Amino acid sequence: MPAHPASRRLAFATSTDYPSIQPDDAHLAASLERLGLEPIVCVWNDPDVDWSAFDAVLIRTIWDYFKHHAAFLAWLDRLDRLGIPTINDSALLRWNSDKRYLLELAERDVGIIPTQLASAHELGDVLSTMPAQQVVIKPAISGGAWHTLRGTAGDENFAQALTRLPRDHDYLVQPFVPEIVSDGEWSLLYFGGEFSHAVIKRPAAGDYRVQGEYGGSADPIVPSAATLAAAERALAAVAKIGHGDQAYVRVDGVICGGRFLIMELELIEPFLHLAGYPAAAERLAQLVAAQLKED
């Protein structure tokens, strides 16, 4: 039971495939209730939701937004017109929804996986400059390894696979990083700008994708001071770009040659690995409650 009657209504934004609060967010939802908030599950693109009935929208498992990007941006515009704040902030969500932000970070001396941006029609030209290299190609607007390909530049089968990619997307072209398979991909969680916890994600045998739906695993880990410093340098760069109000962020990266390189900053709907960290769920709930009190 909540410690006191709920006084603020919080839309807990989900997607059609995940129309309920997921187990990893269960303690977060319970903590919000104890703080006097009423988390109500709402599918983000459900036309029947009256968003004006809420005090704020907490973005959680909207894990299909990249497949409906124009509608996602229109939804954020609608919430802005209604004066309904989002957590994270809508301007930050828009910026983070297109992975070309990695190039902005690189311009600010943040170490990233080397990245080139190309239209579908330019992929062949870009790959011609990377003969025989193992590469990964993904849409600039994507998630969960959607339309992601790994192969060798110049390989005929890989070239054929590229022709089957949607032609209306821009793509990131990156060298394949073998350390993801050998050592794992790091995820560092920050709430309100402060480090909370970290996990190391590893792909299943024979794969390179670390997502759970492909058999990947995640285990708790303690990052080094150098890894934390690299992650925090990236977050500071985001703040300098103009997005300093980060209620939650997951910093994904890999250590190459002793250096932590950013793969992605997840500021929209990251899996937060809260199930094993109830205190972290409570801290995030307190941040959300404080933000609503300020609004």
Image (cartoon, rainbow, N blue to C red):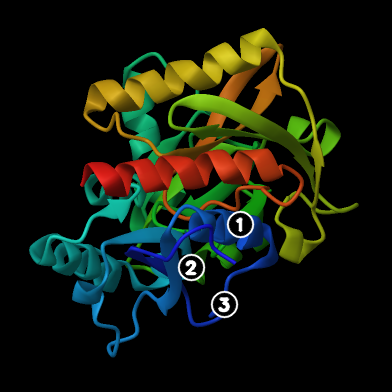
Which of the 4 quarters of the picture holds residue 212? bottom right
Which circle, 1 or 3, is nearer the viewer? 3
- Tell me whether circle 2 and circle 3 mark residues in contact (CB < 8 Å): no
What is the crowding at mark 3: few (fewer than 14 residues within 10 Å), some, or many (at least 20)?
Answer: some
- Reply above or below: 276 against 116: below
Which label was assigned to residue 149?
A: 1
Tell me if label 2 and label 1 are in contact, CB under 8 Å.
yes
Could you say which disc has been placed on residue 20 in the image?
3
Q: At 39% from the left edge and 47% from the top edge, which residue is drawn?
A: 289
For the residue marked with disc 1, what is the amino acid?
Leu
| As drawn, 3 above or below 257 | below
Residue 241 lies in quadrant: top left
Query: Badge 2 is on which residue?
Result: 165
Amino acid type at mark 3: Ser
Q: Quadrant of residue 294?
A: top left
Q: How far apart are marks 2 and 3 (CA)?
A: 32 Å
- State the CA–CA distance, disc 1 to disc 3: 31 Å
Q: Nearer the viewer, residue 156 or 12?
A: 12
